[in-house]
Amino acid sequence: MAAPDVPSLIEGLRDGGDRREAAIARLIIAGRRAVARLVEACRATTDRELQVAILRILEATGDERALAAAETAIAAHGDVAVAGIAVLRELMGRREGGADVKALDMLLAIARDPSADRRVRAAAVSALDHAPADVRQAIGGLAAGDSPLPAPESLDDALWEDALNGRLPDDPARLREAIPVHAPAAALADLHRLIEALGAREQGEPRRASAQQWLAVRGALHQALALRGSRIALYDLRETFDRAAAQLPSAFLGAIQTIGDDSCLEPLAAAFVRTKEARWQHQLAQAFHEIVKRERITKRHSALRRALAKAPELGG
């Protein structure tokens, strides 16, 4: 079998999608032959998705040289750090070159670090809990000392708490999945801050596809607020429609139909005029008329007059 072209496969990791997954599979098969270049690439790049992909491969290889990449990953926080902890978890079972002892020391330090992301600490505690039996026995003795390990916490719960504290994950999908579970019981002030953090992350995202994913998360959170009858972030909802250059995720429409007031009519009219998509125009018109009906807004209302001046078609 021909030797794998490791540099080309690492380049394939940058592409995402099927090509990335194919490169990951081939690099895992390459095993130890690819480790040195993978470690070098992981430490040299600032592309967080590439780092996570490399760490997935290093986790599967279980090579002690991956310690260097794991250490770099821990310093990067977030999803990259969680992927680095997965590497350390595998190395705890390796007796080569003292990798197991070094991995254990790093995991214990992370688990006991109160300044670390909650999700990173939770991943470290979980990794220690799945250590080989002799390692768990040693940990039990250490935990009885002056610096006990924190109580186990699910990664999803920790991710949510981190997000409320302004530490957003790299992957918006995980946070979106957490919203229906956690948002109904969260403090409204915390959700308000999270809305602002999501908006800032979305605006700062250079890749359009990623920005759209963060937009969808913000929409899901607006919908959760609307289901609670809260207008605490209504200003953000209005501004989103007012500047929308294209169709928004359906959660935004659901939210504005549920809690929108007279101040939302002009932004809806602006979005209606701006778009050429017939289906989106129809949905905007439905939301517009739902608000007018629910809030009992008459044609004498100044907000309705201003909105119809922008989009006379909505007066039909």
Image: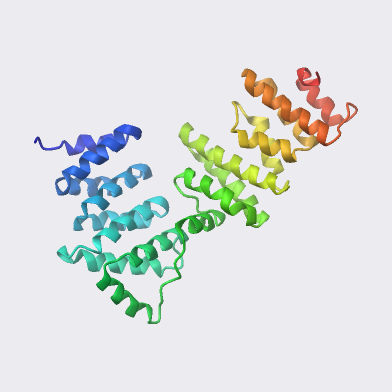
Name the quadrant containing residue 269: top right
Is residue 159 shown left or right of residue 90? right
Q: Position of residue 169 (x, y in %)?
A: 47, 49
Residue plotted at (21% across, 42% down): 27
Is residue 165 shown left or right of residue 85? right
Note whether residue 271 is visible.
no
Q: Residue furthest front?
A: 133
Of the 4 image quadrants, the one containing the C terminus is top right
- The answer to which of 59 and 54 lies nearer the viewer is 59
Note whether residue 297 is visible.
yes
Q: Residue furthest right?
A: 300
Colouring method of the image? rainbow
Q: Where 125 sits versus 170, above or below?
A: below
Residue plotted at (21% across, 51% down): 61
Q: Position of residue 102 (x, y in %)?
A: 25, 66
Residue plotted at (44% across, 67% down): 152
Is residue 31 shown left or right of residue 268? left
Q: Position of residue 179 (x, y in %)?
A: 57, 49
Name the quadrant containing residue 259: top right
- The answer to which of 14 and 294 lies nearer the viewer is 294
Residue plotted at (21% across, 64% down): 99
